Image (cartoon, grey):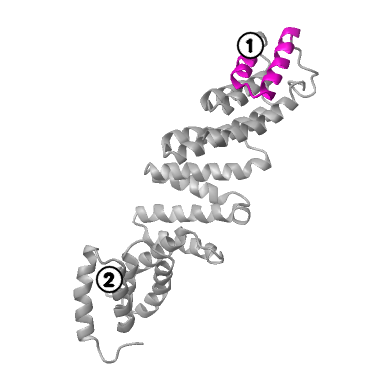
């Protein structure tokens, strides 16, 4: 996290130092600080230039003791604390700067960036609750400028990810859906939009809403189909579509509804074939594909699929059942099999 925040902090500091002599409240004239405080500010600038972080922090704290209402000093302290990986203290400093000067754009943007980077770093470390403490605080801030919308879309996605990992699915759905609904996300951040759909599909699947899951995964597949290099999730999404449709087919069969079965299986097969072709990490895609071929009496393709299953997963307990089934299928395969 320290490397990422150092880069961010450098950029924020450049902004902060550029406005150190600017009005604390635009339109009201220059901020008045004592000569002694101004000298300390000059020494602070020099310490920053010489990359003496501890000295710079000590100097800017002295300025704050002398000039507690000087918003720029609180902002600069926040930048230095952020650069030193002291995120919570940095956030408090940016908040103090905004309390003193609500229209202070640099402090507001710095606070947003600090909360975002801290939330992302905690997510990377799988500290999902801590991550959301930062991200939800960010998302609760007043509406951002247009240029911040991309960051806020990702903040919503990461918050949804945290809730998903915490198995708080209603909250996860809320944030993934809000990420997906942000203006411009589908066109400008297609990967983020698609991944939100993927997680919405997973939530539906966890809730045993297999048709809802299939719908979201289908949309994900449609969005990713055009990509030359498919992400790993592509294989999984194809499997989940096939699985959801297969479950619906089995439910219909249990109810004696067999009309249109061939068409239903014809819809399932391409998804399972793509899942296997793109490296789905498990035997279930082969199993469902083989079963689909059996339902349509395409026995040659069923045999071929079960053989591939056995070759790919020789140690799986499930495979032994299909070895026996494969023997029976070869022995009793009807002469009028489909090609």
Residue 146 position, x and y percent, is 68, 42
Q: Is residue 79 visible?
A: yes
**Mark 2 neighbour density, 10 Å: few (under 14) some (14–19) many (20 or more):** some
Residues tagged 1 and 2 counted as in contact (Cβ below 8 A): no
Q: x%, y% of residue 226?
A: 56, 66
Q: Earlier in the sequence, mark 1 or mark 2?
A: 1
**In the figure, 6 relative to 211: above or below?**
above
Q: Is residue 139 visible?
A: no
Residue located 69% across and 24% down the image: 49
Q: Does the magenta run of residues contain 54?
A: yes
Q: In the displayed structure, would residue 183 be above or below residue 265?
A: above
Please, what secondary structure does the residue beneath circle 1 have?
helix
Q: What residue would you read off at disc 2?
A: 310
Q: Which residue is mark 1?
A: 62
Report the front residue among 148 and 180: 148
The stretch in magenta equals 34-63
Query: Percent from the top left, x then y, of residue 120?
Result: 51, 39
Tell me the quarter of the picture where residue 32 sits: top right
Picture coordinates of residue 184, whole percent (x, y)? 63, 52
Residue drawn at x 67%, y 11% as measured from the top left: 67
Q: Give the quadrant of residue 102.
A: top right
Q: Is residue 108 left or right of residue 163?
A: right
Dominant secondary structure of the residues highlighted in magenta in the image: helix
x 49%, y 48%: residue:
176
The residues bearing labels 1 and 2 have C-alpha atoms spaced at a distance of 72 Å
Numbered disc 2: secondary structure: helix
| 306 horizontally vs 44: left or right | left
């Amino acid at each position: 996290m320290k490397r990422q925040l150092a880069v961010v902090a450098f950029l924020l500091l450049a902004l902060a130092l550029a406005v150190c002599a600017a009005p604390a409240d635009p339109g009201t004239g220059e901020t008045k600080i004592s000569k002694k405080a101004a000298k300390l500010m000059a020494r602070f600038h020099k310490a920053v230039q010489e990359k003496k972080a501890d000295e710079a922090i000590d100097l800017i704290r002295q300025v704050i003791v002398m000039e507690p209402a000087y918003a720029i000093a609180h902002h600069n302290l926040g930048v230095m604390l952020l650069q030193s990986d002291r995120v919570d203290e940095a956030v408090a400093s940016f908040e103090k700067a905004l309390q003193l000067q609500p229209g202070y754009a640099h402090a507001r943007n710095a606070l947003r960036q600090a909360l975002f980077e801290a939330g992302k770093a905690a997510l990377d470390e799988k500290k999902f609750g801590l991550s959301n403490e930062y991200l939800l605080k960010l998302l609760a801030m007043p509406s951002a400028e247009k240029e911040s919308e991309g960051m806020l879309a990702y903040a919503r996605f990461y918050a949804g990810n945290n809730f998903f990992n915490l198995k708080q699915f209603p909250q996860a759905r809320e944030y993934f859906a809000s990420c997906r609904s942000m203006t411009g996300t589908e066109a400008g951040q297609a990967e983020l939009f698609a991944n939100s759909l993927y997680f919405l599909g997973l939530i539906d699947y966890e809730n045993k809403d297999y048709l809802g899951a299939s719908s979201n995964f289908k949309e994900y597949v449609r969005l990713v189909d055009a990509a030359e290099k498919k992400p790993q999730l592509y294989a999984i999404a194809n499997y989940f579509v096939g699985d959801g449709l297969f479950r619906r087919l089995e439910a219909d069969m249990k109810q004696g509804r067999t009309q249109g079965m061939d068409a239903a299986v014809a819809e399932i097969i391409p998804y399972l074939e793509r899942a296997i072709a793109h490296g789905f990490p498990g035997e279930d895609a082969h199993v469902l594909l083989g079963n689909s071929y059996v339902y349509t009496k395409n026995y040659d393709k069923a045999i071929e699929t079960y053989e591939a299953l056995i070759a790919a997963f020789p140690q799986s307990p499930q495979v032994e059942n299909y070895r026996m089934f494969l023997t029976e299928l070869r022995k009793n395969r009807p002469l009028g099999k489909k090609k």
